[in-house]
Amino acid sequence: QVHLVESGGGLVQPGGSLRLSCTASGNIPSSNAMGWYRQTPGPERELIAGIRSGGSTYYADSVKGRFTISRDKGKNTLYLQMNSLKPEDTGMYYCAAPEILSLHPDEWGQGTQVTVSS
């Protein structure tokens, strides 16, 4: 079983920054990718940033150039540095560890809310 705990969300003004963290524990194969997903009002969670086991990264067009994903394998922690935040970045942010980024994760953390508003 996988246990994921996200933190770092909050209220920030447009143009501001936040850094999200996700601490992972449990049976996560080292070959798995990890990713950050965003859910706005609605059922879908969109992959916005991912990092593969080899270190290569993926970013959705909506966050490219503003967000940076990183991973500390020794601490089993995933990060998302979010800069130049926009109101449309508002949502619940979740991390997950799918086998590969193209697969929909089976297990999720509780999420952390990010609100970008003046």
Image: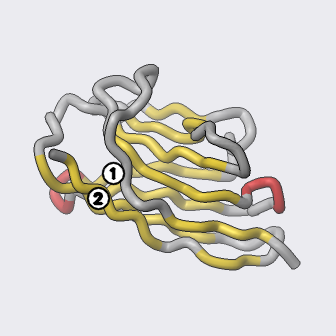
- Mark 2 residue element: strand
Quadrant placement of the C terminus: bottom right
Amino acid on which disc 2 is placed: Thr
Residue 58, placed above or below residue 113: above
| Nearer-the-camera pick, 84 or 113 | 113
Question: Which residue is painted at 68% across and 40% down in the image?
Answer: 64
Location of residue 56 by image quarter: top left
Report the residue marked by disc 2: 77
- Apparent side of residue 18 relative to residue 85 in the rendered image (left or right): left
- The x, y position of residue 28, in whole percent, is 17, 40
- The x, y position of residue 40, in whole percent, is 70, 50
- Apparent side of residue 38 relative to residue 35 in the rendered image (left or right): right
The crowd level at tag 2 (other Cα within 10 Å; few <14, some 14-19, many 20+) is some
Report the residue marked by disc 1: 71
Amino acid on which disc 1 is placed: Arg
Location of residue 97 by image quarter: top left
- The image's colour scheme reads secondary structure
- Apparent side of residue 41 relative to residue 96 in the rendered image (left or right): right
The crowd level at tag 1 (other Cα within 10 Å; few <14, some 14-19, many 20+) is many
Residue 91, placed above or below residue 39: below
Question: Which residue is painted at 52% across and 68% down in the image?
Answer: 19
- Mark 1 residue element: strand
- Apparent side of residue 66 relative to residue 72 in the rendered image (left or right): right
Label pair 1/2, CB-CB below 8 angstroms: yes
- The x, y position of residue 36, in whole percent, is 49, 46
Question: Which residue is painted at 35% across and 31% down in the image?
Answer: 52
| Nearer-the-camera pick, 2 or 23 | 2
Question: Real-space Cα distance between discs 1 and 2?
Answer: 6 Å
Residue 71, placed above or below residue 117: above
